[in-house]
Amino acid sequence: EIWQAALACCHAVLEGIAAKDVASIGITNQRETSAVWERASAKPIHNAIVWQDRRTAERCRELKARGLEEKVTAKTGLLLDPYFSATKLEWVLDHVSGSRARAEKGELCFGTIDSWLIYKFTNGKVHATDVTNASRTMLLDLKTLAWDGEMCALFGVSKAMLPEVRDCAGDFGVAEALDGIAIRGVAGDQQAAAFGQACFKPGDVKSTYGTGCFALVNTGAAVPASSNRLLATSGYRIGSQTAYAIEGS
């Protein structure tokens, strides 16, 4: 349903416009919503689990009780909360029969909605995400901006199902479903808004208002550490330039 809505929107925008006249398209998306699909068929194995879903609250409480939140925060910049993707993905692997074994074999793909749309638009040729979305999964080492083996092990996630992490501006393939328009930019929700508002200098702040209010502060090349349970996150990465951010919601 998400795929069909996005495709219909693109077709409406392109009405009367030739694909060759479009330089490229970009994708922004709600960051933590999670999907799992078959690599070969691109068929989802379960409904997407949206950011507000609280079904893994008890699992997060259990991990906190084991004293693991400090380690999770040190690695990922995030708090142990159902908001983030890791426990959503763990829930799917625990509740869809045979999915964990299939994931280990490389038969399944995980992604936030940017990854899902990239996969569909490129007819399965590109399974990728960008640093901003990856930093909201609770599976990414925020310092290296690479998938973290310890976090994957904690949540029982096979790295074989994770998308390749790329810069926000880069090559994400071509949208074959749109006559070959290049996909050249990806950034998650709040980070995309901060970039759009030109928050390029440390100390620049943007605040967006929607379901909630989200303030994002550019901290430059430094990974921020909050003493007030704010989140550390990837702001963007373009070529050799990496910016981090601190977020309150």
Image (tube, rainbow, N blue to C red):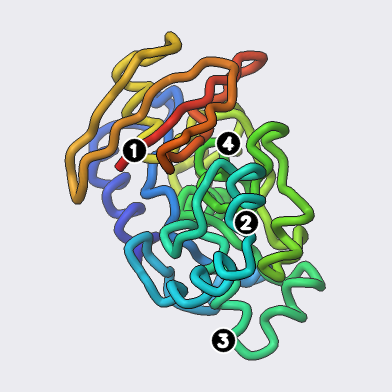
- Mark nearest the camera among 4 and 1 is 1
| Type of amino acid at the residue the image marks with label 2 | Gly
Crowding at dot 3, Cα within 10 Å, few <14 / some 14-19 / many 20+, comes out as few
N-terminal-most mark, 2 or 1: 2
- Amino acid type at circle 4 is Val
- Gap in Å between the C-alphas at discs 3 and 4? 28 Å
Q: Is residue 70 left or right of residue 194?
A: right
- Which residue position holds label 1? 248
Q: CA distance from mark 2 to mark 3?
A: 25 Å
- Residue 118 vertical placement versus 188 (above, below): below
User: Considering the numbered disc 2 on the image, is that residue within a helix, a strand or a loop?
Assistant: loop
Quarter of the picture holding the C terminus: top left
Residue type at mark 1 is: Gly
Q: Earlier in the sequence, mark 3 or mark 4?
A: 3
Residue 195 screen position, x and y as percent: 38, 22
- Point out residue 121 in the picture as x, y percentages from the top left corner: 50, 50
Residue that badge 3 annotates: 95
Structural crowding at the residue carrying mark 4, measured as other residues with C-alpha within 10 Å and reported as few (<14), some (14–19) or many (≥20): many
Residue under circle 4?
131
